[in-house]
Amino acid sequence: MAPAKDSKPGPPRSEKYLLGEKMVVEFLGKPYELGESNIFSETLREYTFEHTLSSYARPGLTFRERNLLNIALFIATNREHELRINLLSTAHNGLSKEDTCEAIRHCMLYTGMAAGRDAFLVASELLGK
């Protein structure tokens, strides 16, 4: 993403930022775009890469397992935007449509009908083809 037109080039990226940038490509299968570059999107990108996505390099969980956990967490917390991102990365991380469907169904047991219904509608829109 290019720097905002009204900003000067920022400081060099930290090692954690660069690791997060690498992890997002490995997890999603492509770079993640936050939209128009400005002070808000760049601050969000920096924070997300350094504090969230760099942790995806930790041992112990595969990307497939992280993807399943993320789906469950975003259903439970009603975070549709993040759910969409994670549903679109399922095939890249080795989850079949059947795996994803079962994960959503299982989440519905604990998060309730409305949360499960919303997740199924999003999954149908994104993956139902």
Image: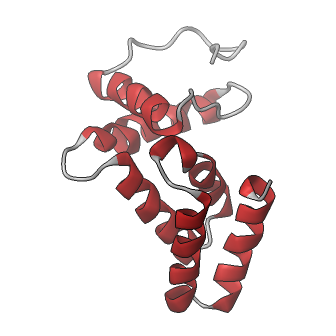
Residue at figure coordinates x 63%, y 18% from the top left: 1
Q: Residue furthest top?
A: 9
Along the horizontal axis of the image, is 89 left or right of 63? right
Q: Quadrant of residue 14?
A: top left
Question: In this orientation, which residue lies closer to the viewer: 7 or 29?
Answer: 29
Q: Is residue 106 above or below residue 59?
A: below
Percent of width and height locating residue 69: 41, 64
Q: How many marks?
A: 0
Q: Is residue 93 left or right of residue 88?
A: left
* Vertical relation: 14 (above or below) 50: above
The answer to whether one can see residue 77 in this image is no
On the picture, is 105 further left or further right than 129?
left
Q: Position of residue 85 (x, y in %)?
A: 61, 49
The colour scheme used to paint the residues is secondary structure
Pick whichever, 64 or 50, lies toward us. Answer: 64
Residue 104 in the image, given as x and y percentages of width and height: 57, 74
Residue 15 visible at all: yes
Residue under the image location 52 percent in, 41 percent down:
92
